Image (spheres, rainbow, N blue to C red):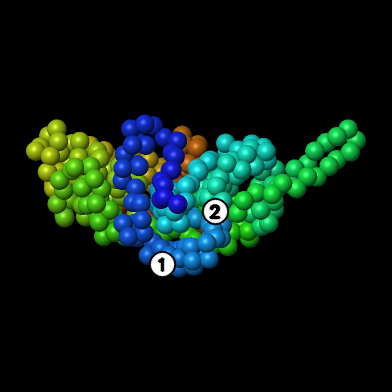
Amino acid sequence: MAKENAINTHIMPEERESENTLRPQSFDSYIGQTKIKENLKIYIQAANERQEPIDHVLLYGPPGLGKTTLAGIIANEMHRNMKIVSGPAIEYPGEILAIIKQLPTGGVLFVDEIHRLSKPVEEALYSVMEDFVFDAVIENGEQTIVRRISVDPFTLIGATTRAGLLSAPLRDRFGIIHRMEYYEPEELAQIVTNSAVKLNADIDRKGALEIGGCSRGTPRIANRILRRVRDYAQVKYDGHITKEIVDEALGLLDIDRKGLDLTDRLILSTMIHKFLGGPVGLDTLSAAIGEDPGTVEDVYEPYLVKCGFINRTPRGRQATDLAYAHLGIKHD
């Protein structure tokens, strides 16, 4: 079967084109997550030799670390087509059955935000994932009929930023579970260098390292910053990207050397000035800065905790001495 790439994304056309252009298509071109790659290579080779799909895969971790890209590579390495759906978009069990029925034998279904599947859909997946059968419940007057519908073997790849919200029965049906880790600056610099080639952008080693160091350990952010720096270098200079040009562009983007943006710094300064450094509850902090609590918890907080700027305590979030030092605020 010819190798196909059918990664569908639900983002703006400009971002979609850029994301698809920059996505690696094989393990050889995928940088980082070394242990996960080595394990998946073994699983895929073994499954290909047996001519059967690999076990269902669960990828979890902060957003932007390459879960969708890795799912696409799994499909490519298995020489299979991949269909992408979003968990919240599937409301009824019949919808997931229709999607799975469209897959060829051994096909790959990627469910993004799988923790947001409705309870009926999640429960319908139990038998589908385990036995490749779908139990359809048909109400016929006072009689309830359960009809078992067989589906062809397939691989379900689920991605989530909040693995703790997955129910135990669903999580247990994944044979392969991997946590995606933040990237090191050197790895991000290599990603930036490779992406610059694909974008026809000219960047030197120090410029790539500077972008890698302020990208919050996240390839998606590194590529986003690269595109904006490329625009700045094209308009203000001759297009060649150096460390100095990166620093200038980051200043316009309000991104500091640690990768903190205006919202990150607002979170820290609000904790320090309004709540005396904490501890402060998530809802209270979110109301004070005008952000959704889920956004603060899922998007901003993980990196601030990783950098050591915030401690999570039983009483709430607390700013650390490193946060005071980073903002240049004296800690009484």
* Residue nearer the viewer, 162 or 131: 131
Residue on which disc 1 sits = 38
Residue 308 spot, x, y in % from top left: 38, 58
Q: What residue lies at 41% left-to-right and 50% top-to-bottom?
A: 2
Residue 232 spot, x, y in % from top left: 18, 36
Q: What residue lies at 54% left-to-right and 53% top-to-bottom?
A: 106
**Residue kind at label 1, given as amino acid type:** Glu
> Which quadrant would residue 103 be assigned to in this image?
top right
Q: Name the disc covering residue 106, or none.
A: 2
Residue 331 spot, x, y in % from top left: 35, 54
* Residue nearer the viewer, 61 or 121: 121
Give the structural element (helix, strand or loop) at label 2.
loop
The single residue placed furthest to the front in the displayed view is 1
**Residue kind at label 2, given as amino acid type:** Gly
Q: Name the disc covering residue 228, or none.
A: none
Seen in the picture, residue 170 relative to 5 is either above or below; the reply is: below
